[in-house]
Image: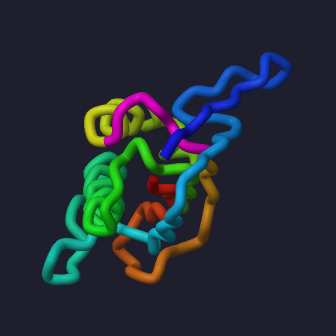
Amino acid sequence: MTAERVNPPGLSPPAGFSHAVVATGSRLVFLAGQTALDADGKVVGDTLPEQFERALGNLLAALHAAGGTAGDLARVTVYATDVADYRAQAPQLGRIWRRLAGRDYPAMAVVGIVRLWDEAALVELDGFAVLP
């Protein structure tokens, strides 16, 4: 895949996301929402950063199983049960993202929600990737 990150100068400078991603490739991978579930189906982690790290790891594991890498991500949506906490934890969440997925950010959105399927889950990530 080739991915061009587009961040127009007339828009607010992006921090932790790209305004647009132009991707070319031959395979699309749609990634189901991932929370901080372990292999036994239990939510692990009591804090947002702990759960974010596990959820991102799960998303990347699904992507890798489909033949992709973090650099192939074109779009990720983050669903958070507490957007104020997400904003407060953003620096730490950004460090987790960079450690696991690198510095080439996909187009992203954070959506505040009332709750997730698993009541103990604080965050869920889904997205899609374009593979060569």
Instruction: Judge whether residue 107 can be spotted in this image.
Output: yes
Of 83 and 26, the residue lying toward us: 26
Give the colouring mode of the picture: rainbow
Q: Nearer the viewer, residue 31 or 1?
A: 1
Instruction: Please give left or right for residue 95 compared with residue 132 in the image.
Output: left
Q: Of residues 118 and 33, which is closer to you in this image?
A: 33
As drawn, the residue found furthest toward the left would be: 40
Residue 62 found in image quarter = bottom left
Tell me where the magenta segment starts and ends, as one range: 101-107
Q: Is residue 14 above or below residue 35?
A: above
Percent of width and height locating residue 91: 42, 28
Rendered residue at 70%/26% (across/down): 7
Q: Main SS of the magenta segment?
A: loop
- Residue nearest the viewer, comparing 26 with 113: 26
Residue 120, located in which quarter of the rendered image?
bottom left
61 left or right of 115 in image? left
Which residue is located at x 69 percent, y 39 percent? 20
Residue 49 percent across, percent down from the top left: 32, 46
- The answer to whether one can see residue 36 in this image is no
**From the viewer's perspective, is 64 left or right of 131?**
left
Residue depicted at 49% across the width and 57% down the height: 129
Figure check: 49 above or below 29: above
Residue at 52%, 65% (x, y): give it. 28
Residue 14's spot in the image, x, y percent? 64, 27
Q: Is residue 83 magenta?
A: no
